[in-house]
Image (cartoon, helix red, strand yellow):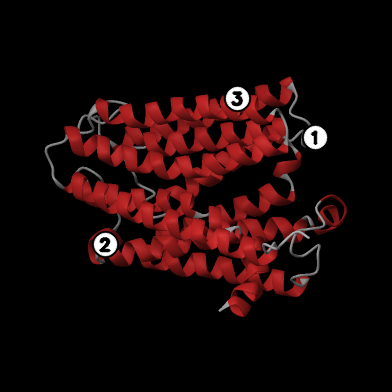
Amino acid sequence: MRRTLAKLAPILHLTRVTTAFAAIANVWFVVLWTQASAKEIGTPAMSDHPTWILLLGGAANALGLFAFAAALNDVLDLRRDRTLNPERPIASGRITLDAAVSLVVGTLMVAVLGAAVLGVQAVLLTLLVGGAILFFNAAGKFVPAVGLVALGLIYAGQMVVPNPQLVFVWPVWLVMTHSLAVAAVVHILKRKVPTLSRRAMGFAVFGWLFWTVIILVSGWARSRGEGGLWPGWVSPWSALGPALLAAVFVLMSYRKVRLYGPGPRAANKIARYGALWLALYACAWLIGQSIWAEEGSYARAAWILTALSAAGFIGMTVLREAYALLEHPLGYRR
């Protein structure tokens, strides 16, 4: 068992699967929300397949896209990593470049196969998100004003793969906003090059406002006039939980910066908790709607997502600790 995990450790490090759970939780939320909501349009796959099949396909799709993005990043950054991050799996020689390229192709295939369970629209959107990931890693991240917006859109696009016709789009907007904000803070704290200037920040804010309008107007158009930008069948109080979580995250991030000081350590903490927070947002939306809505389907969906999120988070944490011990085993000091 130890030997097997030792062989898998470079792959797990390369694909960052231990932080992929947020992407899975986002997809699960859309699946469960669509099935619980009579007013959501949904896709034919939502009614043709049982919930567990949809969740399994959504998890494969989300995990595949996340691992594809992480592996592609290391492949394209190989020369830079050999100088700045020699401990990375490819740069350190723990995994060959050919194997990494095969992993890039394989993870994208897993994402497409997972999307096939969700329907033709899901497959097309997966390919579109994959193209956006390629653009971000090849060029977007080197232009912060473009890269930050692109990253937020990648998270939003990956989230709606199961149902591109989602009517209640505020959770998608929150994921886009949260991801963009976290990426900006991490960029500043790590002092990444090129730096995030005021002009670049202004362009990023403009891009965020532009896509905010696009997302909200598209949801309003699909709501058929029921409640304007906020659908009438969704309780306004359901936003209370996500709003409180957002406030807590801001306070916690401020505390981490005060505790560790500006730098990579605080940035890594914020990035890690930022990923976890996406799963918490998803649970909070369903829990909030289940409290105020008369339909019991929201409560069932909330319990399912909360249980899956807890199990997934525990599993990812155990996996992370296991391969961390393999790469840096404990020993006795003489």
Helix, strand or loop at mark 1 = loop
Label 1 to label 3: alpha-carbon separation? 17 Å
Mark 2 or 1, nearer chain start: 2
Report whether 1 appears left or right of 184: left
Q: Hey, what amino acid is under mark 2?
A: Thr
Residue 219, by quadrant, is top left
In percent of the image, x 71 and y 26: which residue is there? 200
Picture coordinates of residue 96 (x, y %)? 77, 73
Q: Is residue 242 above or below residue 85?
A: above
- Answer with left or right where residue 217 lies relative to residue 142: left
Q: Position of residue 140 (x, y in %)?
A: 70, 43
Cβ–Cβ under 8 Å for marks 2 and 3: no
Q: Residue furthest left?
A: 294
Image position, residue 255 (x, y; %): 57, 26
Whole-angstrom CA distance, mark 2 to mark 1, is: 45 Å
Q: Which mark is residue 51?
A: 2
Residue 282's spot in the image, x, y percent?
37, 42
Label 1 amino acid? Answer: Pro
**Picture disc at residue 194:** 1
Does residue 323 appear anywhere in the picture?
A: yes
Mark 3 packing: few (<14 Cα in 10 Å), some, or many (20+)? some
Nearer to the camera, 254 or 23: 254
The residue indicated by pointer 3 is 205
